[in-house]
Image (tube, helix red, strand yellow):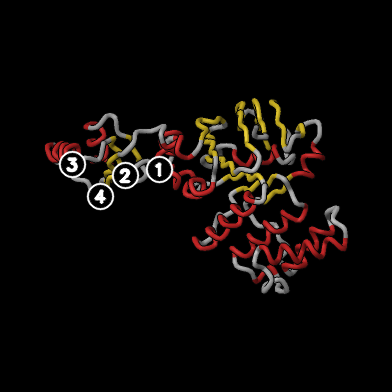
């Protein structure tokens, strides 16, 4: 039987008259990666802030690492680590000094602390930069140090709030490898991200949050099966052509920002020929034409009405 690292029921939060979380339910099995997706303002960071005891919920219940969030917040804090959207390192200190500072603030003893610092520097490939001020680090190295600092207390659950925002593709993939290694060691990871490829690559389960409500949950493959399979993507030069094409294909999904239309199709030559003939019949021309299989971008658009670019 799989143990739940996080179990949430009916979680609610409002700021004055604005409802940010409207009764969400979710469960995160221990030793897995759970990803929470959603456009800006959907309530992702608020969810993380509540589950990490930085903010109180207005209603609902939650258990984190087996502890009741409201009744035993101290035990919850002892069991978790948090890495926010921006690296929380002291840029005046070296990498080693940043880690030592976290050790000094934790229950780890002085003797064990030296070993912990040395192990983390080695584990995160920070040995060469350990004696350099953090202000000289690249964004990727700074994020690695930030995550290493989170691990000083050996947390059971780590909350990563958009940990790869602003990183170049190579640094992002390095962070993915580190996250996978953490889970292989038995850590549970609660990840928020706006990079759908990241969620697809890493997450065992995904939940999509929109306007304070969970609109879907499941494995990446289960979410992809929520929408029609293969589709044809047509991009037009202007809104007038997009409007005209949308009338021809009422089952299609519009992307107004990209001037694109996603038309359900089996991808076969007969259906493609029929689609192109219909466009030609009405003197419509697409600037771009491609056949695509479902991905999380399609799921996100179908569920929230936003593209990932528009959501940022």
Outermost residue, front side: 1
Of the numbered discs 4 and 1, the one sitting upstream in the chain is 4
Q: Are marks 3 and 1 in contact (CB under 8 Å)?
A: no
Residue 179, numbered label: none
Disc 2 element: strand
Q: Which residue lies at the image location 63% right of the left edge and 69% below the top edge?
A: 137
Decide if residue 29 is on the left or right side of residue 156.
left
Q: Nearer the viewer, residue 54 or 151?
A: 151
Residue mark closest to the camera, 3 vs 2: 3
Q: Could you classify mark 4 by the number of other residues whose Cα lies within 10 Å: few (under 14), some (14-19), or many (20 or more)?
A: few
Residue shown at the point (72%, 45%) measured from the top left? 156
Q: Give the crowd class for mark 3: few <14, some 14-19, many >=20 residues within 10 Å.
A: few
Please provide percent x and percent y for residue 177: 57, 57
Residue bearing the label numbered 3? 269
Pick whichever of labels 3 and 4 is earlier in the sequence: 3
Give the alpha-carbon distance from disc 4 to disc 1, as whole Å.
19 Å
Identify the mark nearer the N-term, 3 or 1.
3
Q: Is label 3 in a helix, a strand or a loop?
A: helix
C-alpha span from label 3 to label 2: 14 Å
Res 52 → quadrant: top right
Residue under label 2, please give it.
Answer: 292
Place residue 129 in its image quadrant: bottom right
Q: Which residue is mark 4?
A: 288
The image quarter containing residue 269 is top left
Q: Position of residue 304 (x, y in %)?
A: 46, 35
Q: Secondary structure at mark 4?
A: strand
Nearer the observer, disc 4 or disc 1?
1
The percent coordinates of residue 46 (x first, y second) are 64, 39
Q: Which residue is mark 1?
A: 295
């Amino acid at each position: 039987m799989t143990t739940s690292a996080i179990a949430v029921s009916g979680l609610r939060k409002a700021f004055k008259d604005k409802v940010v979380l409207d009764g969400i339910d979710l469960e995160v099995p221990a030793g897995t990666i759970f990803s929470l997706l959603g456009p800006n303002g959907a309530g992702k960071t608020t969810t993380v802030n509540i589950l990490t005891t930085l903010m109180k919920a207005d209603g609902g219940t939650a258990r984190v690492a087996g502890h009741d969030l409201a009744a035993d917040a101290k035990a919850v804090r002892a069991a978790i680590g948090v890495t926010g959207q921006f690296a929380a390192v002291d840029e005046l200190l070296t990498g080693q000094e940043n880690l030592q500072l976290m050790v000094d603030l934790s229950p780890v003893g002085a003797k064990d602390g030296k070993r912990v610092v040395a192990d983390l520097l080695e584990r995160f490939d920070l040995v060469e930069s350990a004696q350099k001020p953090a202000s000289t680090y690249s964004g990727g190295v700074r994020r690695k140090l930030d995550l290493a600092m989170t691990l000083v207390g050996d947390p059971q659950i780590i909350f990563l709030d958009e940990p790869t925002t602003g990183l170049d593709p190579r640094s992002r993939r390095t962070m993915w490898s580190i996250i996978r290694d953490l889970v292989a060691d038995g850590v549970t990871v609660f990840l928020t991200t706006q990079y759908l490829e990241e969620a697809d690559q890493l997450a065992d389960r995904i939940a999509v949050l929109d306007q304070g409500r969970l609109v879907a949950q499941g494995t990446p493959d289960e979410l992809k099966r929520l929408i029609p399979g293969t589709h044809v993507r047509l991009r037009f030069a202007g809104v007038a052509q997009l409007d005209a094409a949308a009338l021809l294909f009422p089952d299609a999904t519009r992307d107004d920002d990209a001037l694109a239309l996603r038309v359900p199709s089996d991808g076969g030559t007969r259906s493609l020929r029929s689609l192109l003939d219909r466009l030609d019949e009405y003197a419509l021309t697409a600037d771009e034409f491609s056949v695509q299989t479902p991905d999380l971008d399609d799921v996100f658009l179908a569920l929230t009405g936003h593209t990932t670019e528009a959501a940022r």
